[in-house]
Amino acid sequence: MITPLRSSNFRRSNQTMRLIVTTFVGVVFGFFLGVSFPTISLSKVNLPSSLFPALDLTYLEDKYSGLSTQAFLNVWSSLKGHKYAAKFNNTKIWAPKNPRGTETLPPGIITPESDLYLRRLWGLPYEDLIVKPRYLVTFTVGYEQKDNIDAAAKKLSENFTILLFHYDGRTSEWDEFEWSKRAIHVSVLKQTKWWYAKRFLHPDIIAPYDYIFVWDEDLGVENFDFEKYIKLVKKHNLEISQPGLAPNSGLTWAMTRMRNDTEVHKETEERPGWCSDPHLPPCAAFVEIMAPVFSRDAWRCVWHMIQNDLVHGWGLDFALRKCVAPAHEKIGVVDAQWVVHQTVPSLGNQGMAENGKAPWEGVRLRCRNEWAIFQDRLSAADKAYHKSLS
Ligand SMILES: *[C@@H]1O[C@H](CO)[C@@H](O)[C@H](O)[C@H]1NC(C)=O
Ligand SMILES: *[C@@H]1O[C@H](CO)[C@@H](O)[C@H](O)[C@H]1NC(C)=O
Ligand SMILES: *[C@@H]1O[C@H](CO)[C@@H](O)[C@H](O)[C@H]1NC(C)=O
């Protein structure tokens, strides 16, 4: 009923206008038809069986019980697709360039990437998003650290998507914060940041974000501005970065200590003998795992390096350099935007007390073991690759 109108009178008008008019006409028409046949049951109507091949009408009737018969027919005829479909019904699709397993689909319908954008239940899909956030900030949190996270979240504009990974199962408590309502909450008991990252931050799922913050919960952001940080990261071409750590942060490495005199630094002096090469970790090409920020491309690489079973991520920091080149130029610490690492014992305390050892000791031991295992796997993989070449 809509097609003739559209083709003769409205061809030249713009799409929005067309949509409004056709929708309106459709609604009015459907309404009158609906009013004239309000209670006709689909299964009792003598429909041409070719229209509903192999369809259980009772099922459909149930599913669309809110629709009048005519409105239903309208929906159905649009579901049946346009007239071209029938023309090609014998031609099998085999599009080998499609993603694995989707070769039978017409490439135009394939949507290989996703996002974390929230949408409305009503209105037109293309009007859902006023702003498309370009940055993703994730925190792995327990409710105890809510003040820290609240302080950070309050600094995040509409340009950021907030994603919280809850390791303590407490999610509804966060409702007290206004920003929490537009945040995404993933709750799985007692898992680590890298466990969540591997499972919920697949590069294809978070494809639209330019930068991804994979942060711990114990970072003080009083002197930190997210937008300014990103500006500096762009200015200095950092693919992998972290904010400088204030001197009172319980520092492990010289590299991540903030400096007074620079916006960004990419190398440092460590204690004598710690660096075999000034361009290699821990003297350069190195940030820690507590507050890294990745570009989209760097994350695609790093995600693939995360091991499913090595949940603490120890050793990953030393290997990040494999994902960008030249690493000593593309990995760096932003001094002008810095944070305080509070080293709050949180998830690290939630191990099991075993063999007379405190829960945190077991966790720490596993961290160390994982580091060794990761190193072994990485060098074995390196070796295997080089062997395969020769
Ligand atoms: C489409 O399928 C129908 C029924 O299977 C068949 O009669 C018709 O010839 C087919 N059309 C083409 C173009 O192959
Ligand atoms: C969000 O991003 C846009 C585009 O980069 C920028 O113009 C705007 O200032 C940002 N919003 C805030 C609140 O910083
Ligand atoms: C920053 O500079 C001040 C003096 O300009 C100095 O006293 C202080 O130690 C410096 N801090 C760091 C972390 O280097």
Image: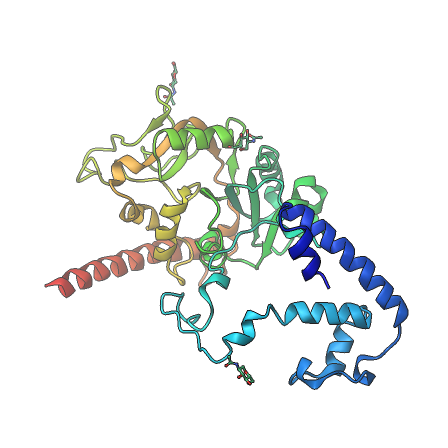
x, y percent for residue 344:
51, 41
Q: Nearer the viewer, residue 275 or 232?
A: 232
Residue lying at the far left in this picture: please name it: 390
Image: 267 above or below 5: above
Residue 14, quarter of the rendered image: top right
Q: Nearer the viewer, residue 3 or 19?
A: 3
Name the quadrant of the C terminus.
bottom left
In the picture, measured across the screen, residue 263 lies left or right of residue 1, that is left
In the picture, measured across the screen, residue 116 lies left or right of residue 337, that is right
Residue 293, quarter of the rendered image: top left
Image: 32 above or below 285: below
Residue at 24%, 33% (x, y): give it: 271
Name the quadrant of the N terminus.
bottom right
Residue 63 makes an appearance in the image: yes
x, y percent for residue 239:
35, 40
Residue at 34%, 54% (x, y): give it: 368
Q: Nearer the viewer, residue 62 or 381?
A: 62
Image: 107 above or below 350: below
Judging from the image, the colouring scheme is: rainbow
Residue at 13%, 62% (x, y): give it: 389
Residue 172 makes an appearance in the image: no
x, y percent for residue 82:
60, 68
Q: Give ligand 2's quarter of the image.
A: top right
x, y percent for residue 62:
77, 76
In the picture, measured across the screen, residue 364 lies left or right of residue 178, that is left
Residue at 40%, 73% (x, y): give it: 94
Residue lying at the far front in this picture: please name it: 8
Label count reads: 0
In the picture, measured across the screen, residue 257 lies left or right of residue 40, that is left
Q: Nearer the viewer, residue 309 or 69?
A: 69
